[in-house]
Amino acid sequence: MQAPYLPEEENLPAPEEVPAKEAPAKPAEEPAEIPEEDAKQKELQQIWQQVFEKAVSRRASLKLLANDIRALEEGPDSFTVSVTSSLKKNMLLQNGELFEESLEEVTGRKLKLKAELGARPQDREKQMQNTLSQLEELLGPGKLTVKE
């Protein structure tokens, strides 16, 4: 292929480029300290993730439980998770023995799996809005003031 014909006035050389000034290097910021509670929660969630992966490797159908299960706490003889539906809670508890075996492999301790039914964040927001609406109906329009 041939280059298209350009008239001579359009074939002018490009103006010289001026080198851009480099921004001064910023000193490395120290990472913010993670609160101990958040670090513990992250560790619990990592333990749960390992346990879950081991259980799924033994029974693939458990992969259906992957979402909306959150590690809550690890006690001396139990490991508690929060689930968002009673169906998931029942499936989790029906396969409790498998999860408990996986817990023992990951933690090195024999722990009993406990599951609590917890609300999803969007469900909590909806519940709060419903409660505020009911209060406003009881008090009358404009009588309820909410401060954040």
Image: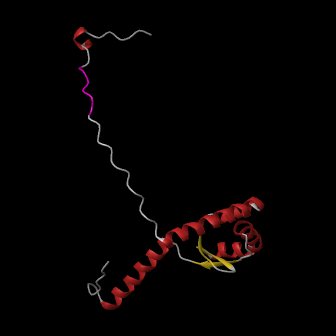
Residue 58, picture quadrant? bottom right
Q: Residue furthest bottom?
A: 138
Q: Quadrant of residue 32?
A: bottom left
For image coordinates 69% across by 61% down, the residue present is 53
Q: Which quadrant is home to the N terminus? A: top left
**Mainly helix, strand or loop, the magenta region?**
loop
Near-viewer residue (130 or 69) = 69
- Count of numbered circles on the image: 0
Whether residue 68 is visible, yes or no, is no
Residue 2 placement (x, y as % from top left): 41, 9
User: Does any portion of residue 135 appear in the rendered image?
Assistant: yes
Check if residue 17 falls in the magenta segment: yes
Which residue occupies 33% across, 86% down? 136
Residue found at the far left of this picture:
9
On the picture, is 5 further left or further right than 79?
left
Measuring 74% from the left and 72% from the top, which residue is drawn there? 100
Residue 10 position in % (x across, y down): 24, 14
**Relative to the observer, which residue lies in front, 141 or 143?**
143
Q: In terms of depth relative to the viewer, which is nearer, 113 or 35?
A: 35
The residue stretch that appears in magenta: 15-20
Percent x, y of residue 68: 58, 68
Q: Colour scheme of this structure image?
A: secondary structure
Q: Quadrant of the C terminus?
A: bottom left
Q: Is residue 66 above or below residue 74?
A: above
Q: Quadrant of residue 60?
A: bottom right
Q: Is residue 146 left or right of residue 96?
A: left
Q: Is residue 53 left or right of residue 45?
A: right
